[in-house]
Amino acid sequence: MDLELLNTKIAGIERETAEATQKVTSIDALRSLDSAVLGKTGSLGGLIANIKEFPADQRGQVGKLVNEAKGRIKSVLDARMAELQQAAASASDEESKWFDPTLPGNVRPMGSVHPVTAVQWEIERLFERLGFTVEDGPEMESEYNNFEALNIPASHPARDMQDTFWLANGMVLRTHTSPVQHRSMKKFGAPLRVIAPGRCFRYETIDASHENTFHQVEGLMIDRDIGLPHLIAMAKMLLTEVMQREVTVRVRPGYFPFVEPGIEIDMNCAICGGKKCPTCKYSGWVEILPAGMVHPNVLRAGGIDPDEWSGFAFGLGLTRLAMMKYGIGDIRILNSGDLRALVAPQRMGGPIIVDKTTKSRAVSEPRP
Ligand code: PHE
């Protein structure tokens, strides 16, 4: 390169930069233009790197030419910057003239859905994909729907399995979501696929894993030739999908008057990883999914012929599953408004272990 060529290059860069400067409409874009031209490796700034190509006695001249050009370009950029800043300031003046005090403030959105709600929505989406309807049932139920229709007559000892809140009007606070099984059979007949999430109530002694108010999700599928393998496959898929990892389950026989056979599907305790803790009652396993094949008496009560149809039902412990998913070690926290548990669904970085004994452990703010 010689001085003449250098001069031509510099003139070209100045012209192009001046044009580009006028086209730029934002402060950020202007800053990028600045570094693209004047930066060390920029179109003008980079020319200095060629200084070695010139004979020693011309190098001073080269430096001078480049630096003078830099100065001129800088003042063009600065002038444009002043214009843009002026424009931005008057735009925000304009905005503030129109300030509307009734609009929500310009603050970072705060709050999140409750962990139980978050898991409930996940399960609803999953089952809707599988062709299930989401049904609702009342929290105040008739004794008939909560018990008799489910093959639990008044004298049956199984009534003692579920300590019941009786209301003065003779109704009960439903002890499980299973009454929605009966309601759905009446409403839709067979074949049938429903889930029914909701709140249930039991007169319980409260501890780390028992509350008087908790959530379940009832599941019911009635069709021809439905069997236990369908139930177990569905249960595994459900737990794996919610926990977002392969879940180890254990299947045991279980007794519920409204299923035959009845089973208990347990999952490995996610709080202690199976090492035994208060949440899993030191067993390493958590009862999460009581289930079974719908008892013929229950089908009959729902107006469905047990010789033609069969089905499975489950009563997922939704509250427990939310605790497992988010690593919440004490059920009492969920109804307490404790922020450590309430921000859980917003946190993406794995479970936070929260229990009543770690009172002072701060939880960092939810992610924006
Ligand atoms: N309703 C039962 C309970 O709350 C759970 C269950 C539902 C069991 C469906 C079997 C089938 O304990």
Image: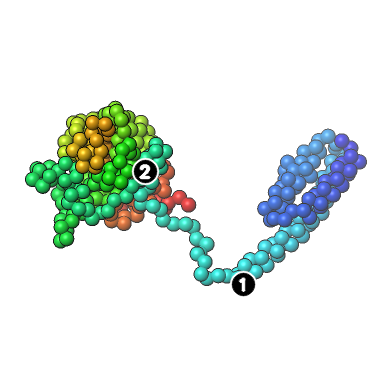
Q: Indicate the secondary structure of the residue bearing disc 1.
A: helix
Q: Is residue 144 left or right of residue 338?
A: left
How many numbered markers are drawn?
2
Q: Looking at the image, which residue sits at the far bottom?
A: 97
Residue 209 locus on image (x, y percent): 22, 45
Question: Hey, which quadrant is residue 274 in on the image?
Answer: top left
Residue 28 locus on image (x, y percent): 67, 53
Amino acid of disc 1 = Lys
> Tag 2: Cα neighbours inside 10 Å, few (<14), some, or many (≥20)?
some
Question: Would you name the residue on which mark 2 appears?
Answer: 133
Front residue (pair 112, 68): 112
Residue 40 locus on image (x, y percent): 72, 43
User: Which residue does the image show at 10% across and 43% down from the upper left?
Assistant: 156
Front residue (pair 56, 318): 318
Front residue (pair 128, 232): 128
Cβ–Cβ under 8 Å for marks 1 and 2:
no
User: Which residue does the image show at 32% across and 50% down from the upper left?
Assistant: 136
User: Which residue does the image show at 25% across and 44% down from the upper left?
Assistant: 182
Q: Is residue 264 visible?
A: no
Q: Quadrant of the N terminus?
A: top right
1 or 2: mark nearer the eye = 2
Q: Report if the beta carbon of the residue with label 2 is closer than 8 angstroms to ligand 1.
A: no
Front residue (pair 295, 74): 295
State the CA–CA distance, disc 1 to disc 2.
Answer: 51 Å
Question: Would you name the residue on which mark 1 appears?
Answer: 97
Disc nearer the start of the sequence (1/2)? 1
